């Protein structure tokens, strides 16, 4: 079994992890200070969200230099020290690879807009239509038009995301060669792989008008096209396979057939990918509009991916999703801790490589925002503008955005009960959740029954179970609030039963409990609220 299948990944959003120099902004030395916490948790891989120089139009996902470190995070020497210190603790590091687009402040774009012969075709430029209109009717992922006029070049450029994130032109072989240089640069420094941002939209097969859609019009012309498969295969065979590393792809609106093409091992493209269906069971149309959660639907989706792919990337939270205990658990309610533990049983008992997002292991919740003005997230601000066009009342817009904004996961990690939760001595770049005195690392490390210590227990349980590492997944049953599945290896099996609700539920199982989030030793046919058992 490859090493990255056995380990647990811990995602760090650097600006919100730990500030070491008192500027209110997380940094690389701050990460080094907390490496022992990650080791104690049981994680063996760290995924770092972007640390590269960036104007921060999209919190670092608009990169102006792929071969540097943004001074607000530290220096290249700090980064090399982080790799070395992590290695001492048997922790490997993967980085974000954002290659669909760059910042408009990247040297390549600045030269391209001047029509420098070397860089003129690094991006997707098109003249205005005869009537002065945009090249096509596409809209982007941030609910904006996908084209922006550039006065210096005298043409429009394509951007599927923010207007300061122009898309690279993968019809130009020079762009692919630039990406290979980036991969080699970081792999030679000791990086163990990459999380590949929106990796299934690289290749724009055509620039024809898109079919009518409420959002992201034009998707059929670039989502998971054959050109993207060729690019990923080339990067894998010519660079990545020469190193002991792995890749995980973030894939926009991917379905199972597309996912198979992207990450089945014999195709030599990605090693695994993130999908989103399992976090949208209680959402309709878009992640911002809620509906009732149904455990039966949730199990159907989990089963589809568990049985459909050779290997899964398992996650419940990341920097783009609301906190899972506020989403599928009891938030700050009576069963906050119990529901957080239940969700950890889910994550560590299905097949794949688990990804834990910073603060998830202590049950950090959605932020207690009171007004839209507190948000930093460009996506949330743009969705509010879009909903205004549809005359959606302000209070309903705010309810939906507050539940689902990406900023919910981006507030600083709550280390202790001191000022700013121990994240920084100064005012943080984004406020700390006011519940930090109740929910923090320092309290939970001392409490043997805490969420943190239960996460440690679950990570160790998974590591010691060949059934959980290698066994097949079989769904058993589900209703509105509870579900059960089995993991089987040869003649041995483990059955996992989860209650996602506030009330007890009947279940067709009895017997000795191998693990429970409420400490029970026998199952008598009834699950307590938010209980999880393994039998």
Image (tube, rainbow, N blue to C red):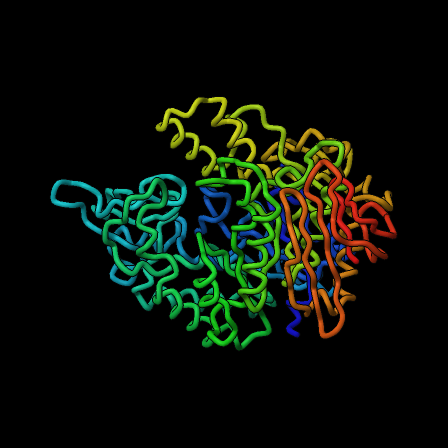
Residue 430 figure quarter: top right
Picture residue at 66% right of the left edge, 52% below the top? 356
Confirm whether residue 177 shows in the render. Answer: no
> Which residue shows up at 64% across the image and 46% down it?
479
In the image: residue 447, left or right of residue 486: right
505 vs 486, nearest the viewer: 505
The one of 36 and 409 positioned closer to us in this rendering: 409
Left or right of 467? Residue 297 is left
Residue 151: image x %, image y %?
24, 42
Q: Is residue 246 above or below residue 523?
A: below
Q: From the image, which quarter does the C terminus lie in?
A: bottom right
Q: Residue 392 location in percent, x, y?
A: 41, 25
Q: Position of residue 456 (x, y in %)?
A: 78, 54
Q: Residue furthest left?
A: 130
Pick whichever, 376 or 80, lies toward us.
376
Q: Residue furthest front?
A: 508
- For the point 18% across and 41% down, which residue is it? 133
Q: State whether residue 495 is above or below residue 17.
A: below
Question: Which quarter shows the N terminus?
Answer: bottom right
Taking the spot 64% from the left edge, 31% from the top edge, the residue there is 427
Q: Nearer the viewer, residue 387 or 371?
A: 387
Residue 336, image quadrant: top right
Q: Is residue 19 left or right of residue 529?
A: left
Residue 38 visible? The answer is yes
């Amino acid at each position: 079994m490859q090493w990255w299948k056995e380990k647990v990944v811990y995602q760090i959003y650097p600006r919100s992890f730990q500030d070491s120099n008192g500027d209110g902004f997380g940094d690389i030395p701050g990460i080094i200070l907390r490496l022992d916490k990650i080791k104690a948790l049981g994680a063996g891989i760290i995924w770092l969200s972007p640390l590269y120089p960036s104007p921060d139009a999209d919190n670092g996902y608009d990169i102006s230099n792929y071969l540097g470190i943004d001074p607000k995070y530290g220096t290249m020497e700090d980064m090399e020290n982080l790799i070395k210190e992590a290695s001492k603790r048997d922790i490997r590091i993967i980085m974000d690879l954002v290659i669909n687009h760059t910042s408009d402040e990247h040297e390549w774009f600045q030269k391209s807009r001047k029509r420098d012969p070397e860089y003129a075709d690094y991006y997707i430029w098109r003249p205005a239509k005869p009537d002065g209109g945009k090249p096509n009717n596409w809209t982007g992922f941030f609910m904006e038009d996908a084209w922006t006029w550039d006065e210096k070049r005298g043409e429009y450029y394509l951007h599927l995301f923010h207007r300061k994130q122009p898309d690279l032109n993968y019809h130009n072989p020079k762009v692919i060669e630039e990406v290979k240089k980036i991969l080699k640069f970081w792999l030679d420094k000791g990086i163990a792989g990459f999380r590949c941002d929106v990796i299934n939209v690289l290749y724009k097969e055509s620039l024809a008008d898109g079919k009518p859609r409420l959002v992201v019009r034009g998707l059929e012309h670039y989502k998971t096209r054959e050109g993207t498969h060729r690019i990923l295969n080339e990067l894998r065979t010519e660079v990545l396979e020469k190193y002991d590393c792995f890749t995980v792809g973030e894939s926009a609106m991917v379905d199972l057939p597309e996912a198979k093409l992207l990450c089945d091992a014999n195709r030599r493209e990605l090693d695994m990918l993130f999908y989103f269906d399992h976090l949208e069971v209680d959402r309709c149309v878009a992640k911002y509009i809620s509906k009732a959660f149904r455990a039966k639907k949730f199990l159907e989706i989990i089963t589809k991916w568990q049985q459909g792919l050779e290997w899964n990337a398992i996650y419940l939270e990341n920097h783009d999703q609301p906190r899972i205990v506020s989403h599928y658990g009891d938030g700050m309610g009576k069963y906050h801790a119990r529901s957080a533990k239940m969700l950890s049983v889910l994550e560590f008992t299905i097949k794949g490589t688990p990804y834990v997002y910073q603060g998830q292991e202590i049950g950090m919740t959605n932020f207690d925002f009171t007004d839209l003005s507190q948000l930093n997230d460009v996506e949330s601000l743009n969705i509010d503008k879009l909903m205004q066009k549809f005359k959606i009342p302000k209070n309903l817009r705010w309810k939906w955005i507050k539940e689902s904004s990406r900023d919910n996961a981006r507030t600083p990690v709550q280390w202790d009960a001191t000022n700013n939760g121990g994240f920084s001595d100064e005012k943080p770049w984004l406020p700390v959740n006011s519940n930090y005195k109740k929910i923090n690392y320092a309290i939970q490390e001392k409490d043997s029954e805490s969420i943190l210590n239960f996460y440690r227990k679950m990570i160790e349980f998974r590591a010691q179970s060949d059934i959980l590492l290698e066994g097949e997944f079989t769904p058993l049953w589900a209703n509105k609030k509870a579900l059960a599945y089995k993991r089987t290896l040869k003649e041995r099996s483990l059955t996992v039963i989860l209650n996602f609700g506030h009330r007890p539920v009947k279940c067709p199982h009895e017997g000795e409990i191998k693990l429970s989030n409420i400490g029970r030793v026998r199952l008598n046919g009834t699950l307590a609220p938010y209980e999880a058992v393994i039998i």
